[in-house]
Image (tube, rainbow, N blue to C red):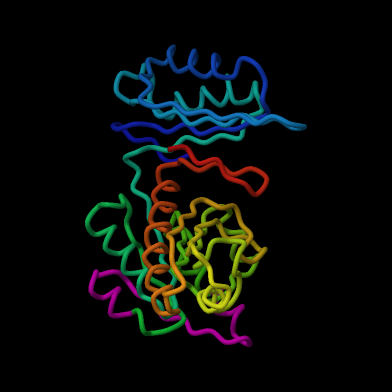
Amino acid sequence: MSDSPNEGSARLVAQCAKRPGILAAVFEYLDRQGAVVLQGDQHSTDGENPRFFLRVEYDLAGLKAPPEAVAEGFGAEVASRFGMDWRVAYSSARRRIAILGTREPNCVLDLLWRARTEELAVDVAMVLSNREILRPLADRFSVPFHHLPVTRETKQEQERAMLDLLRGKVDLVVLARYMQILTPTFLDEYPERVINIHHSFLPAFAGADPYGQAEQRGVKIIGATAHYATADLDAGPIIEQDVLRVTHRDTRAELMRVGRELERQVLARAVRWHLEDRVLVHNNKTVVFS
């Protein structure tokens, strides 16, 4: 749970095995605490192991107890009863992100701009890169830049240095076309808190030069995919995808231009939804509440 604030709203996110009475218990508890529900979303699955997903946002004004006491009471009374995997976050708790990039500036610049203009309610704590080329972008937005070059022989040392810079300072790591594979050791420190943008409509055209592959195949759509990074390359839970139509007249350069536009939009949406606690993960799939 995040540190409790004194104003704004709380976001209660939970999932558990599907069974009767969950919604009634949640809303009855919140009602007893004087919570005014601002938004509520739910989803359930069927099949062999049916599961229930919930996101409730409620106003902190009018609570009969401090927000942290309300959250703790929910855990004791409701979450424990239904075996929930749950968390509470607060709208006024400013999140901090680190942006990792290599050469391509488009996604890095887009995130820096959205943060500067408050289109994304987030603080960019730092930009990390294995190349110097992105330093001018970070300097333009007065964001600390750290250059950590890497070779096959120094990869473990470089990752340790990155973790030393990130640990305790960021809530989310965004791979904005960071062209290095992160090891399980790194990813284990940020489970479901590393978002990657892939420049194709996964699982199509994974790996190198997806736009060249797309041109050779004569595709009619170009896509982009944002997902949580896992130890399985480009196979983590998908948060957002989008596509645009293209034709046989489009060159590789035009496909790249269209694809970069999609990358920026898809990555920004995925980051926003994560920051707003709209994404729940189960069995390498996501439920994303609008």
Residue at x 58% of width, y 61% of height: 202
| Image: 68 above or below 33 | below
Tell me residue 224's x, y (percent): 48, 62
List the single residue furthest toward the front: 248
List the single residue furthest toward the right: 48
Residue at x 45% of width, y 25% of height: 69
Residue at x 59% of width, y 52% of height: 237
Residue 248 painted magenta: no
- Left or right of 203? Residue 121 is left
Residue 91 falls in which quadrant of the image?
A: top left
Asked if one can make out residue 201 in the rendered structure from this viewpoint, the answer is yes
> Which of these two is toward me, 226 or 215?
215
Question: Quick one: quadrant of the C terminus?
Answer: top left
Residue at x 55% of width, y 76% of height: 180
| Image: 161 above or below 2 | below
Q: How many marks?
A: 0
Asked if one can make out residue 146 in the rendered structure from this viewpoint, the answer is no
> Which of these two is toward me, 280 or 251?
251
Tell me residue 71's x, y (percent): 47, 28
- Left or right of 247? Residue 160 is right
| Image: 277 above or below 205 | above
Tell me residue 68's x, y (percent): 43, 30
Q: Which residues are magenta?
A: 135-160
Residue 52 falls in which quadrant of the image?
A: top right
Tell me residue 111's x, y (percent): 33, 62
Residue 138 painted magenta: yes
